[in-house]
Image (tube, rainbow, N blue to C red):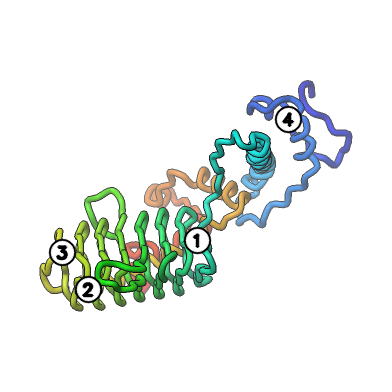
Amino acid sequence: MKGDTVISSPAKTLLPSRLLLLAGLPFPLALSVSSIAAAAPFTPSPAPKGTTCLVALAISMGTLGRVIYTVGFWIRETGQAIDRLGSRLQGNYLFQEQISRHRTLMNIFDKVPNVHKDAFVAPSASVIGDVQVGHGSSIWYGCVLRGDVNSIYVGSGTNIQDNSLVHVAKSNLSGKVLPTIIGDNVTVGKFSLKPCHSAVLHGCTVENESFVGMGAVLLDGVVVEEHGMVAAGSLVRQNTKIPSGEVWGGNPAKFLRKLTDEERAFIAQSATSYTNLAQVHAAENSKSFDEIEFEKLLRKRFARRDEEYDSMLGIVRETPAELILPDNILPDKARATTPSSQ
């Protein structure tokens, strides 16, 4: 076909260079990309039943998408290499702006984070230095846990929610050396009218199954005993002790009331819900390019399907397993389906 790149091999799939030219690539680069795409074999993963046409479409579109993605990666790598070379050539006249890739886990001096293999640390979070994160815990997007001048301990099943900050104290006015210790099944950063979670824990101790609301600030030496609750937006002053089963709030934080039985149960449920939700996020973040593209096609096919309307027409559509969230992520759904299943 005129305008297309022809490769003299009947076993190769031809990729039109015209498409790459429309994408803004210069002709020599488009020509080489077409050759690479034709030479690269594509082996899709096994598809669910009834999705043969989708697989065929994924093969044609997935190959082009993968090539463009790979070329983009090469260009970015080349750009960084050129920047480093130019910086060396400038010598003493250099004004260097570091291009630094984000590192989720970072050691400092001889201190290395110790994160359990079943814990979830979001890609944009930062866990730095002497930090230990236990089984089933989750560190969400934008969080910073900085264990540089002291240690941070996070127990099992605990969730540190988005944009929260956990730091430590090497020294303070009272002369105490204060690590930050967060127990098991603790929730940090939840429930507020504020647009973000953003709790701050500095050189404090939060015991098992406690609750720290959004925007709350816990200063050096604060101790929140088991089943204690700090209300959203509160400022807890240095060396304050919040007894077990009490709710504190305000600026400065003061005793408000006793914790109800429903609130105690909610704290435990919140920790479990976030442990389950973290597993979903971990799975999504680990998906390959092929899996992401294939699920996009599935969502297009099953978008705007109404189960009630289908049942009136006698149509049964089987939703692919890839698009079904586990019941433990949707507790309302689980409760609704339980009576009918009995």
Which amino acid lies under the numbered mark 3 shown in the image of this protein? Ala
Residue 27: image location, x then y, percent: 74, 25
| Identity of the residue drawn at 50% across and 68% down | 113
Which amino acid lies under the numbered mark 4 shown in the image of this protein? Ala
Q: Is residue 293 left or right of residue 205?
A: right
C-alpha separation, residue under disc 3 versus residue under disc 1: 36 Å
Q: Name the N-terminal-most of marks 3 and 1.
A: 3
Q: Quadrant of residue 189?
A: bottom left
Which residue matches tag 3? Answer: 253
Q: Quadrant of the C terminus?
A: bottom left
Which residue matches tag 2? Answer: 228
Q: Name the N-terminal-most of marks 3 and 4.
A: 4
Q: Residues within 10 Å of mark 4 (few under 14, many from 20)?
A: many
Q: Is residue 295 left or right of residue 63?
A: left
Q: In front: mark 2 or mark 1?
A: 2
Q: Secondary structure at mark 1?
A: helix
Q: Is residue 105 above or below residue 182?
A: above
Which amino acid lies under the numbered mark 1 shown in the image of this protein? Ala
Which residue matches tag 1? Answer: 282
| Identity of the residue drawn at 64% across and 26% down | 24
Q: Secondary structure at mark 3?
A: loop
C-alpha separation, residue under disc 3 versus residue under disc 2: 13 Å
- Name the disc covering residue 30, or none: 4
| Identity of the residue drawn at 63% across and 55% down | 47
